[in-house]
Image (cartoon, rainbow, N blue to C red):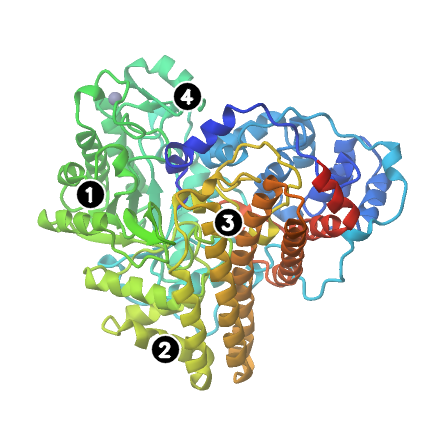
Amino acid sequence: MLSRRTFLQGSALPLLAAAASRQEALPERQPYFPSSAHQFIWRNWDLVPASRISTALQTSESIVRHIAEQLHLKRQQTAPAMDRRLRFSVLRRNWMFVPREQIAILLGISEREIEQILNQDAFYQGNLGQQPKCETIRVSSGSLHGGGIDYFRDDPATNEESRFGFEDAFSHPLPNFTAPVDPKDNQFPSIAYPYVCPYSDPLGDPGYQRYYAIGLLQRMAASGVNAIWLGALLRDLIQYPLFQQFYPFHPERRDRLRWVINQCKRAGLKVYLYLDEPRGARAAFFQVNPGLRGAPGRRGDGLRCLCSSTHEVQSFLQNGTAQLFRSLPELAGVILITASENPTHCYSLTRTPDCIRCRKRRGADVIGEVVRCIAAGAQEASPSAHVIAWDWSWTIVEDDPQAQIIRSLPDKVILQVDFERGSQIRRQGVQSLVDEYSLSVPGPSHRASQHLELARARGLPVMGKAQIGTTWELGTVPFLPVPGLVAEKLSAFAKNGLRGGMLSWTLGSCPSMNWELFSIMDRHPDIDSHRAVHTLAVERYGESSADTVVRAWRIFSTAFTEYPFSNSVVYSSFVQEGPAQRLYLKPSGFAPRIMNSFDNLRWTTPFEPEQISAAFLHIGLTWEDGVATFRTAIKGMSGPAGQLAERDLVVMEAAAIHFQSIGLLVQFYEMRDRNSNSALARSQWRKNIAAQLALAERFLRLCRQDSRIGFEASVGYFYLPLDVREKIAACRYLLNSENDTQRFKT
Ligand SMILES: [Zn+2]
């Protein structure tokens, strides 16, 4: 899961505070672009039509096309149908150098609408951060001279899949698919997120149906998944007088949810709603309802909590939930987060709430009461519905193991336990905390074991939460090819009496080998993990290659257990961008943000930068051996198995390149800042850039070939092939001796 709250409160905070105290940074301007207008046109080329780029620059389309030719940009790859889904990508790539009024023109929306997008999700603001003061960008006549700039040259692309092209496969139903007649989900929900569905308000999108394509849902069902989840706000889905004035009911959202439930039913899947309630409200709401005013929200969000120690809010939770289930009787249940994320009840973000009612009460009792109201409403309208109380971030309210909260939960709710969160690990000789999901740690953590025990002691059913496709250890690939580690995790689930579970957040739900493995282990609960992995190799690629395939996978899994995990490594670095990370030739001065550290290396903590660099290079280079072994296995395959293996190989190789690139980037910034002019330093510097260039060139081919690479449902595309090309251009520019000499003179 991507915890907005954990990032804002947790280990990354000192980084932000330290950076904020520095002088305000200047807008980004990369020296390999002849002008800001060149940088502007490049960054938007595959996202915004040339006509709109020219409007934003107040110039003609022919001038924009002339500059594009200088930069060796070919036909645009824009996809108008995806405009809405790519809005955040446009914001991200322009934020640090383009003024807001020009960004609004690029997006074709108003500056007010940009504000609204940013307010939809705390992650958006956390990822973008403060915008530097940016000058309006215009084309200067001087920059139009000259022909093509050689270091931007591009090899003609073969087999390029358009962005989101992977969705085409999901629009086709699976041949011979029959929906499971009697899904066993009543006892063991196995829940995942539809791979292509955006996180923020999918039901608010008129084009919502494309996110629930029948072929995708059937593939999920075929992998042993029996339910999907999606997020929503309770007040959007019900008619409730309290909210009529400021948050009116959206009947179309409820109709859309009904459609989603029916569509999922066709594939034998149920639907769970993720709720974070009672959702906080704006100041205007509390002017009319002063008696419900709770603790303040997060600084700058303009929100306050809705005090759940009041009768009105408790009634809303209970009667609202009852109305929800009455109007959608086939909704399978709700999954509740009750700490972190958004401001909800008064303890949602703090142990010491500024609320006259709640500060006299224990946080555990407030959480228990919120869950009790929702459970009572669900029970009243739909007795078979599941109410799942998730232990996510309860540390905000009570120290581990949160015995009080677990005691305060009502009977019959299911306790959902984060399986690895809280694990203490030792990597590269350094002690570190896994405060997230991890495939490099099988689990359970000590905290998870205690939660399971406490829940069972009081007779509550339990469920596990993990991510079996991928985690933020590398969230921008469709899956991590470490079936051995996935099998170990699922075995640990079984040993702890857990079946099914919530097995993805918005990432890692792409139908893949890991989900096929889940299906095997779900069908054969007694199978041991080695047998399960071998069965997967046989079922996926055929008997004759299975041993070699298993050998390759073992190489990946073994190396991956050395992943230098810390929350700042996975949340506050350039790990997700890897080979597509922009090279900052000079210190940018930008403060690191969630999932965007620019050229700042403080995220390596608790590891030293050299340890991080060595660990990622080691994992990446070892993975190259795994890739080579897998390639040998492919030689023995034919037909569809061989084609499938080729597609899987792309992901394996992409991950190997990612890891090596992270290691090289850390080295690069270390060398840049040391700025030594010795012959040895110069030769190491050039070697580093040449290695990054070679990896980026390989990566560009893979990323073009498979449009899943770089995609993650909540962000959209973290990067495009265009960004990898920019990296290539930057490396070539630097390798030019004249530019290289310049670096050492500064
Ligand atoms: Zn309160």
User: Which is more N-terminal, label 4 or label 3?
Assistant: 4
CA gap between label 1 and label 4 equals 29 Å
Residue type at mark 2 is His
Residue at image mark 1: 379
The circle on residue 339 is none
State the CA–CA distance, disc 3 to disc 4: 44 Å
The quadrant the C terminus occupies is top right
Q: Is residue 187 above or below residue 585?
A: below
Question: Is the residue marked by circle 4 packed among few (<14), some (14-19), or many (20+) residues within 10 Å?
Answer: few
Binning the other alpha carbons within 10 Å of mark 3 as few (below 14), some (14 to 19) or many (20 upward) gives many
The reply to whether dot 3 and dot 1 touch (C-beta < 8 Å) is no
Q: Which residue is mark 4?
A: 245
* Mark 2 crowd level (few <14, some 14–19, many ≥20, 10 Å Cα): many
Residue 534: assigned label: 2
The amino acid on which the numbered mark 1 sits, given as a three-letter code, is Gln
Confirm or reject: label 3 Cβ below 8 Å from ligand 1. no
As drawn, is 389 to the left or to the right of 727?
left
Looking at mark 4, is its residue's CB closer than 8 Å to ligand 1? no
